[in-house]
Amino acid sequence: QAALTQPASVSGSPGQSITISCTGTSSDVGAYDYVSWYQQHPGKAPKLMIYDVVYRPSGVSNRFSGSKSGNTASLTISGLQAEDEADYYCISYTSSSTLVFGTGTKVTVL
Amino acid sequence: QVQLVESGGGVVQPGRSLRLSCAASGFTFSNYGMHWVRQAPGKGLEWVAVIWYDGSNIYYADSVKGRFTISRDNSKNTLYLQMNRLRAEDTAIYYCARRMSKMPGAYWGQGTLVTVSS
């Protein structure tokens, strides 16, 4: 199962909005509404930010939102803050009942 | 509070075996499926395996199928990953995570490092 495709890096200035894409196929992202997003700071365990494409776990800022169109899911961070600088990963359920992560995106706050 | 604590990592020679454990507390372990996820040094996350709450369903990534075995002991609130025929490319931090809506959810352990080297 090939990894989902994410941009290697995305950057933005404080207060701006950025969007991270996660492109898969009709056998994973396009087939199910089971896409999650994780934030990972260096040396830390991943933190769940979005699940089931659009839902935010309790405690996650409403500046984070998710969406999906066809085979591409997206994570949008609005009102970018310094603390948002981290690596972000998407993950999708697949038609083989397995999971596949995205390649990861490094977000830089300028 | 929910706590997941991995153990069993270390340095092992190629071709040898290692068993990781993930001790769960703060929730009813037997009600939840569990995942193993790994991360090679400086690399991205890779999903490894999942086991249903009762062990009835198990799935593996192609990269570990036939070499790794996920299991659980609900009486001990513990998840396991038996890793056989280890390769250099299995070197990674291994995380356990509680399953939510098919995915690793909000609860992850701190990880345990496995280094495969001669």
Image (cartoon, rainbow, N blue to C red):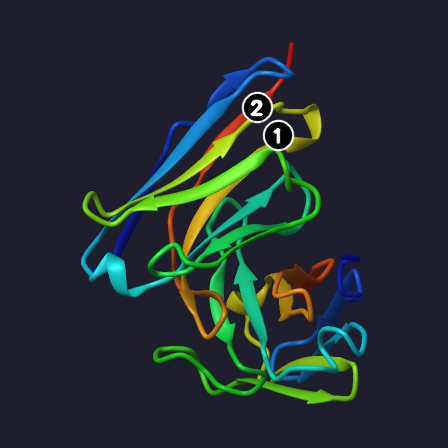
- Horizontally, residue A3 falls left or right of residue A85, namely right
Q: Nearer the viewer, residue A91 or A39?
A: A91
Compared to B100, does A16 lie above or below?
Answer: below
Question: Quarter of the image containing the C terminus of chain A?
Answer: bottom right
Q: Which residue is mark 1?
A: B91
Among the 4 quarters of the image, the one containing residue A2: bottom right
Mark 2 neighbour density, 10 Å: few (under 14) some (14–19) many (20 or more): many
Q: Nearer the viewer, residue B71 or B41?
A: B71
Q: Secondary structure at mark 2?
A: strand
Residue A52 is situated, as x and y percent measured from the top left of the image, at 54, 82
Q: Which residue is mark 2?
A: B115
The amino acid at mark 1 is: Thr
Q: Are marks 2 and 1 on the same chain?
A: yes
Query: Which residue is drawn at the image coordinates 50% and 39% (left, top)?
Result: B69
- Horizontally, residue B75 falls left or right of residue B11, namely left
- Horizontally, residue B102 falls left or right of residue A80, namely left
Q: Nearer the viewer, residue B99 or B31?
A: B31
Tag 1 subunit = B
Residue B61 is situated, as x and y percent measured from the top left of the image, at 65, 50
Tag 2 subunit = B
